[in-house]
Image: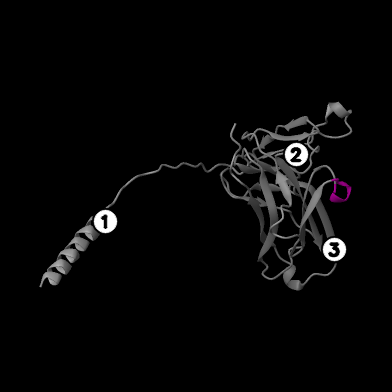
Amino acid sequence: MRIDRRLTLLGVMLVILSTVMATQYATTKIGFSYGIVNPSMADIRFVGSDNSSDGIRLIRCASSNDTGLISINFGNFSAWTNKTYTAAFAIVNEEPFAINITDINVTMISPANQPDYLQIWLHSDGDKDITQDSTYAFMWNNGTKIGDDSPTRWILGPGDQNYYTMQSNVSDALTVINPKWDDTAKLYNVTPEIDPAVNGSTTAWNRLVNFSSDYVWVQISLNIPKTVDATSIAQHYGTIWISFEATTHLKQN
């Protein structure tokens, strides 16, 4: 009988302890904030340059309000056409740390299961074709991604968190570009400006190498073959996916 009482007492204590442990609750709260802005004013942002066949920047806001999604409007082309935009747009980093561009993919929406006919490069000089450029990374070739996911294809240097500027620093020579607002395309854009320091032989926007700048130029070529499938005679729609990777740990002073 003594053993039963001890067991009963132990059981009661366990019930009491479990009840105490099960009612240990706490409440706290954490605030958060973020902004939805124009694609030219984001922390990783897009700046236009080349025009499309309608005279508007190739890259533009797709909706009527200036916080809408962006799109690229190439225009209309016939078969057996090659069209290259050396400065289709710029990708600009405004984060205070470096951003890695790891890969670019293209998916077709319509017509389904049709080639995209696109070639895409990241490169240093928006004035030059890729065959004349000193620094570039081939990213996409008509349905085929070039390179692996893991290696960094291009490193954007830390930005200054100012969407009024794009800047590069090559050989300790800081070059700052000031994009202008385009009210038709509803994005900031860059127009080449002659650099007087080199007597007009180059422009202030093309002195750029990997990691030295907070921006990179995107060259896009449309290569439509001589013969295309009958189902390709239609408007082509798709999506260009750009993948970024970064460490957000900043060095403490």
**Viewer-closest of 63 and 116:** 116
Q: Is residue 132 left or right of residue 165?
A: right
Q: Residue at x 61, y 40 (%)?
A: 95
Q: Earlier in the sequence, mark 1 or mark 2?
A: 1
**Viewer-closest of 55 and 201:** 201
According to the picture, the residue beneath numbered tag 2 turns out to be 212
Residue 14 within the segment the image draws in magenta: no
According to the picture, the residue beneath numbered tag 3 turns out to be 80
Q: Please, what is the three-letter code of the amino acid marked with disc 2?
A: Ser
For mark 3, give the secondary structure. Answer: loop
Q: Residue at x 70, y 56 (%)?
A: 103
Q: Please, what is the three-letter code of the amino acid marked with disc 3?
A: Trp
Where is residue 114 shown, x and y percent of the image? 72, 69
Q: Please, what is the three-letter code of the amino acid marked with disc 1?
A: Met
Mark carried by residue 143: none
For mark 2, give the secondary structure. Answer: loop
According to the picture, the residue beneath numbered tag 1 turns out to be 21
Question: Label 2, label 3: how many angstroms apart (C-alpha)?
Answer: 38 Å
Q: Earlier in the sequence, mark 3 or mark 1?
A: 1
Image quarter hosting the N terminus = bottom left
Relative to 83, say whether 155 is above or below.
above
Q: Is residue 77 left or right of residue 132?
A: left
Question: Label 3, label 1: how many angstroms apart (C-alpha)?
Answer: 75 Å
